[in-house]
Amino acid sequence: MEAALLAALLVIDNVLAHEGPPPPHAPAMVRELLAHPLEAQDAERLFLRAVPGGLVELAQRPPQAESRVFNEVLALYINELNNIHKELRETIKPIDEAPILRRLDEGLVSADQLSRVAAAVDAVRLEKVNAMFIDATLRFAHAARSATGFPTQAFQFDSPIGIVSVGSAGNDRHAPEAALIVDPGGDDAYERRPATGGAVSVIVDLGGNDQYTGSDIAVRGLSAIVDFAGDDRYAMEGPGLAAAVAGASLLIDYAGNDSYEARYFAQGAAAFGFGALVDLEGDDRYRLRAWGQGFGAAGGAGLLWDHAGDDAYSAAGEPDPYERGAGLSGAQGAAFGFRSMLGGGIGILRDEGGNDAYGAEMFAQGIGYYYGAGLLWDGQGDDRYDAVRYAQGNGAHQAVGLLRDESGDDRYELSFGVGQGMGLDLAVGVLFDGGGDDVYRAGTLAQGTATANGIGLLADGGGTDRWEISEGVRAWGHAEWYRRLPSVGLLNYSSSAASFVRAGTSLAQPPASPVAHEAIAYPACGEISSEKLQQAIAGLRRDHLDAVLEVGEALRCSADWPLMEELLEREPASPLAFWVALSLQTHSMRNEKLLRLLDSHPSCGVRAAALEARGSVAAAQAALGSTCWRLQAAARAVLERR
C-alpha cells in the first residue's frame, strides 16, 4: 500500500512531464511542488522564495540607522531613486497604462492586456530593480526618522525625480503631484494617484493619525508608503493599494490600529512585479471587493503580511459568470492564471499572531489556480475562516494552494465545499493545522479530497476536533480516478479525540472510501456544416481555452475526415488533435492516416486517445513499455476490452 501511495503521488509529475511545457510566466516553484506534492506543506520555504530578502530582514532586524543630517540623507535617497528610476525605464518598454487602469477600476486586468505587458517587461532585470527600490526606501525611511536637523517649516523643490515635498509637524494636506513626500508628524491627509510612465511616488510619514485616499497603484512605476505611527486609514476610491503591474508597490505601517479599504487589486497584489502591504502591530481591519489581500497574477507576487494583533480580513466578490452561487474573491493568499494563456503568480497572506477572522466567497484563503501558488499562513491565535467554495487550501488546474495554521482553537467553514485540503485536476491542495481544538465544516469535496488526478491533504496536529460534512461521501480521504489514473485524498488526524458528522449523523470514524472513477460525459452532438467548422478552425485563438473547447466539441461531433487530415498535416501539434481522436472514437472509425498523424503528436494524452481509437492489441502491448502512464493506462483499457 505504501508503494502504491508513493507512486500515486507522482501521477501529476508524470502526466505534466509528457505534455507541453508550462504556460508562459508560470513560477518555477509551482512545477517543482507539483513534482513533490508533500513539500507543499512547507509554508516557510514558499514564503522565503517569494518575498525579497530586504523585506524579510525588516521583520527580523529593523535597520539601525546612524544619526545623520536630514538634508544629507534626503539628497542621497534622491540620487538613488534617480538611478533606480532610469533603470526601470530601461527595463520596461513603454506600455499603454490607461486601459489597464480602467480595467482595474472594474475588476481584474484581462489576459490580453497582461500578454502585452509581458512583451514589454524584462522580468529578470525588473526583479533586481524592485529589490533595489525596496532596500533603498527602507534605508531612507529609517535614516530620516533618526536624522538631525529636520526642517521646522514645510517646503518643496524640484529634483531629478520630480517634486520633493517636506511637510510640517502640523496637520498637512498633501496633493498627489510630488514624487517624494516626507512628513514629520501631525494628522495628515494624502491623496494618491497611480504611478505610471516610469514614475516614482514615495511617502514617508513619521507620526500622526493619517488618512490616505485616491488610487495607490504602480503601472510601469514604483510606489511606496512608509508610515511609522498612528491609527491610520487607507481608503482607496480607485484601484490599488500596495499594488503593481510592471513595477513595485510597497506599503509598510509600523504601528497603530489601522483600517485598509479598497475595491479591486489591492492590499498586496501584483502582476509582472511585486506588491506588498506589511503591518507590524495593532488590531487592523482589511476590506476588499476582490483580487487582493495577497494576490498574484501572471509574473507577479502579492503579499499581505500582518505581524500582530486581532485582525479581520474581508473580501466580497465580483459576479461569477458561471453562476456558482457566490462571488469571485481572489483574495487572502490567492494566485490566478488564465488557462492555456498565462500561468498564475504567487499570492501570500501571512498573519503571525492574534485571534483573526477571515471572510471571503470563492477562490480564497490559500487558493492556487492554473500554475499559481496561493498561501494563507497564520501563526498563533484562535482563528475563524469562512468561505463558500474553492478555498481553505485548494489547488485547481495544475496549481498549489496551502492554508497553514500553526496553533489555536480554530474554526473552518465552507458553506458549499471544494476546499479544506482539496486538489482538483493535476493540482495540490493542503490544509495543515498544527494543533488546538478545531472545528471543520463543509458541504462536499472537502477535508482531504481529490479529483481529476489531484492531491488533497488535510493534516491536523492534535486536539479535540470535530469534522462535519453536510452531504454525500466525497470527503475525508475520498479521491476519484481520472484519465484512468489515480487521485490522492489524505486525512491525517488524532483518532482518540475526533468526532465525525455526516448529514447530521454522528459516525465513530470516517467510513471507508470506495474506489471511484469520474465519468467522462460529453454533450450531445449538434449539427455543424463542414464550411462553418472550417471557418471556426481558421479563426480560432489558440490561447483562449473556451474557444478551443468550443471548436473541439464541434470536431468531436464531425465526421469530416479530409478536413481533419488537412488540419493535422498543416499543424502537427494542433491543440485540437485530442478532439480529432475523440471523433474517431465517437464514430467508431479507424482512419489510418489520421491515426498516424495523431501518433506523432507531442502530447501523450493525444497519443493515448488515438491508441484507444485504434484498438490494436499489438499497439497496446507495445505501449505498455512507455514511460507515459496515460499511454500505459490506455493500453490496459484496450487489452481488457479485447
Image (cartoon, rainbow, N blue to C red):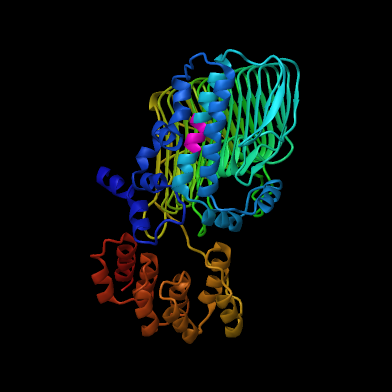
| Up-down relation of residue 328 to residue 525 (above or below) | above
Give the image location of residue 60, x and y in percent.
Answer: 44, 21
332 vs 130, nearest the viewer: 130
Residue 123 vs residue 640: left or right? right
Q: Is residue 400 magenta?
A: no
Residue 134 vs residue 178: left or right? left
Give the image location of residue 377, x and y in percent.
Answer: 48, 30
Q: Residue at x 26, y 42 (%)?
A: 2
| Up-down relation of residue 403 to residue 255 (above or below) | below
Q: Residue at x 46, y 83 (%)?
A: 566
Q: Quadrant of residue 545?
A: bottom right
Give the image location of residue 287, x and y in percent.
Answer: 67, 32
**Tag count:** 0
From which residue to which does the magenta span run? 130-135
Can residue 28 be seen by looking at this rendering?
A: yes
Q: Quadrant of residue 329?
A: top right
509 vs 340, nearest the viewer: 340
Main secondary structure along the magenta-highlighted residues: helix
The N terminus, quarter of image = top left
Give the image location of residue 124, x and y in percent.
Answer: 44, 46
549 vs 301, nearest the viewer: 301
